[in-house]
Amino acid sequence: MNLTNLERIHLNGLLEEYKRNPKVQEMKRYIQHGSISTYEHCVSVTRVSYWLNKRLHLGADEKTLVTGAFLHDFYLYDPKTGGQPIKGNHIEIHPIVALANAEKYYEVDEVMKDCILHHMWPMNNIRPVTKEGMIVQAADKYCASLEWSIYNIRRIKPVIREAYNRLIH
């Protein structure tokens, strides 16, 4: 899902104010989906959302779409250490925490709320209701699947190599 140079420049321009925020940069400290930082994941989901909207001519509002995509996992805690600010299952609570953080630092409209709060569907029962929310949800599942696959291949590769070596020797 390659973007043209002009699309990359445009997308970076749309995200510039968010990328400069030290709290957004903090997402680089948290790992999810095996070995990918939350920041890297959000960048990937944003790129895929933007690409889908452009290539499929979906007509979503670009600024709202990329902002919602970029902030969809703005939860700022490590789910593996139980550092979440409210009790509960990470799958269910992280969108709520991400929205609270987004509202703390930015103006968030109803469409952005939909992107952030409902991106975990169908893993929860709350499906997105806006075009932008549906795009972010689809991009999130696509990126998470690739991230987990890459992580598991890297992790399993030495085991496969070792088994292969035992078979041929």
Image (cartoon, rainbow, N blue to C red):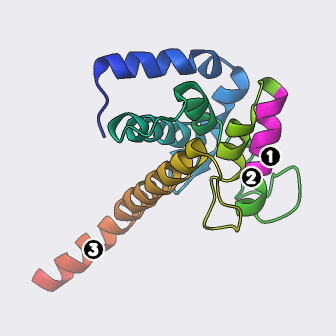
* Residue for badge 3: 160
Q: Position of residue 18 (x, y in %)?
A: 64, 22
Whether residue 169 is visible here, answered yes or no, is no
Q: Nearer the viewer, residue 49 or 18?
A: 49
Relative vertical location of residue 8 with respect to residue 69 in this rendering, above or below? above
Q: Name the residue type under label 1.
A: Val
Quadrant into which the N terminus falls: top left
Left or right of 140 on screen, residue 47: left
- Horizontal side, residue 134 vs residue 82: left or right: left
Question: Vertically, is 99 above or below 90?
Answer: above
> Residue at (75%, 32%) from the top-left corner?
109
Which secondary structure dominates the residues rendered in magenta?
A: helix
Tell me whether circle 3 and circle 1 mark residues in contact (CB < 8 Å).
Answer: no
Amino acid type, mark 2: His
Q: At which x and y percent is residue 128? A: 64, 54
Disc 2 to disc 1: CB gap under 8 Å: yes
Cβ atoms at labels 3 and 2 below 8 Å apart: no
Element assignment for label 2: helix
